[in-house]
Amino acid sequence: MDDDHGPNRRRNRRGQGALLRDDILAAATDLIERDGHSGDVTLRRIAREAAITAPSIYAHFTDLDDILDTVLNGYFDDLRAAILAASEAEDTEDRSLLAGCRAYARFAMERPGRYRALFHRMRPASEASEASNAPEAPEAPEAPDEPDTSNGPDTPRAPAASPSPAKLPSRMDVFQTLIDAIARTQAAGRAAGTDPFQDALAVWAAMHGAVLLRMTAPVFEWPELDAFIDTLVIRTAQVTQVS
């Protein structure tokens, strides 16, 4: 049959497994953006969204955490690329710092579901492990999935032990861009602080709070985003001179 992967899906030809993998990631992304977070995404929902059967997933991903970590690491890559592109377009340390922070805030406001999902997954490993091992909420009964023979054995593999989401907090390379930008600004004599890490924490907390407030209270008469972020960063990072 041509529809072993779902009611409206043709079987991938040999060598096209990457297409199904991309479909699974796209389905997870769509669900995250629609929900505004990753907390309600399940393997069954992903399979439905991608119009495939659940066993098809195990030929490409170990479990739900594997899918979400792959999707969210892509979000981190996009965020870091946006920050670096904006920062590197400026030729002075202070303007580079401000440009990178504006890019961070724009990413959050333009992609609120993705942004919230990044922080939803940042949990202690012990808590995340308990959540991963907990059974999914029961759903309405479905007809049994047909065996999937196009990308793996007839019987789906049992999900492996969930990888620790600690690898997502390890994406602190995004936060490192802020530490480095503040350090360069201080070294250039354009910021009064002496501890780039502590100042970066303060700036991050201020920006994160600012974007979440704008998301949750959109009717408030907020000032223009870029100018507001500039003001936050200048005050919080103790920027003394903007070229």
Image (cartoon, grey):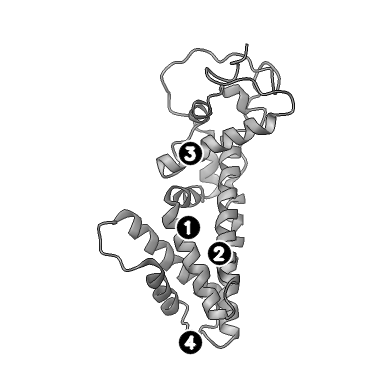
Amino acid type of the residue tagged 4 in the rendering? Gln
Amino acid type of the residue tagged 3 in the rendering? Asp
Contact between marks 2 and 1 (CB within 8 A): the answer is yes
- 95 to 26, vertically: above or below: below
Q: Earlier in the sequence, mark 3 or mark 2?
A: 3
Asked which secondary structure carries label 2, the reply is helix
Q: Is residue 62 visible?
A: no
- 178 to 65, vertically: above or below: below
Q: Position of residue 142 (x, y in %)?
A: 46, 15
Mark 2 vs mark 1, CA separation in Å: 9 Å
Residue named by callout 2: 83
Q: Position of residue 164 (x, y in %)?
A: 60, 44
**Residue situated furthest right in the rendering:** 15
Q: Earlier in the sequence, mark 4 or mark 2?
A: 2
The label number, if any, that marks residue 107 in the structure image: 1
Amino acid type of the residue tagged 1 in the rendering? Phe
